[in-house]
Image (tube, rainbow, N blue to C red):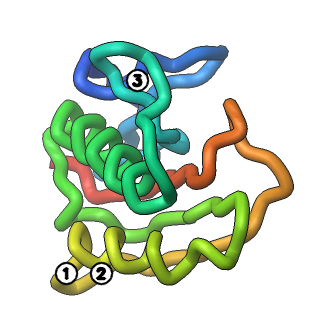
Amino acid sequence: MKQIIATENAPKAIGPYSQAVAHNGLVFLSGQIPLDPATNQMVEGDITAQTERVLQNLAAVLEAAGSSLKKVLKTTVYLKNMADFPKMNEVYGRYFDENPPARSTVEAARLPRDVQVEIDAIAIEG
């Protein structure tokens, strides 16, 4: 049976989707963008600041699922501009400094709210 995961510590879903869904020992996280959950506003700043906020949002959803960034198996990073990869990767590396998950990174022509980065994830539950 699937379990819907929701937390006030990450931006609310703004459409017909869940922040995450847990099933059979795994947690599937929807893509997070750099919205501050307290204000529902975009964070100011460059790709570094946006990546930081996205990873904080992912961590909050994982915590609500009883999981953590250390249990992430796979991420997909969507960048508005692949030239931002080195700066995004530097921030990403601080959050996944040991036994990092598998990852795909793609450039997307346009992301929600014209953000510079969106990241989704699959993790081990609990």
Circles 2 and 1: CB atoms closer than 8 Å? yes
Q: Which residue is the site of mark 2?
A: 100
Residue at 64% in and 60% down: 78
**How many residues crowd around disc 2 within 10 Å: few (fewer than 14), some, or many (20 or more)?**
some
Whether 74 is drawn above or below 27: the answer is: below
Camera-nearest residue between 22 and 31: 31
Q: Which residue is the site of mark 1?
A: 97
Whether 79 is drawn above or below 94: the answer is: above
- Of the image marks 2 and 3, the number of the one nearer the N terminus: 3
Residue 24 appears in the picture as rendered: no
Q: Which mark is on residue 80?
A: none
Indicate the quadrant containing the N terminus: top left, top right, bottom left or bottom right.
top left
User: What's the residue type where badge 2 is placed?
Assistant: Pro
User: What's the residue type where badge 1 is placed?
Assistant: Asp
Q: Which residue is the site of mark 3?
A: 11
- Of the image marks 1 and 3, the number of the one nearer the N terminus: 3
Residue at 22% in and 73% down: 94
Camera-nearest residue between 96 and 52: 52
Q: CA distance from mark 2 to mark 3?
A: 25 Å
Callout 3 secondary element? loop
Whether 36 is drawn above or below 39: the answer is: below
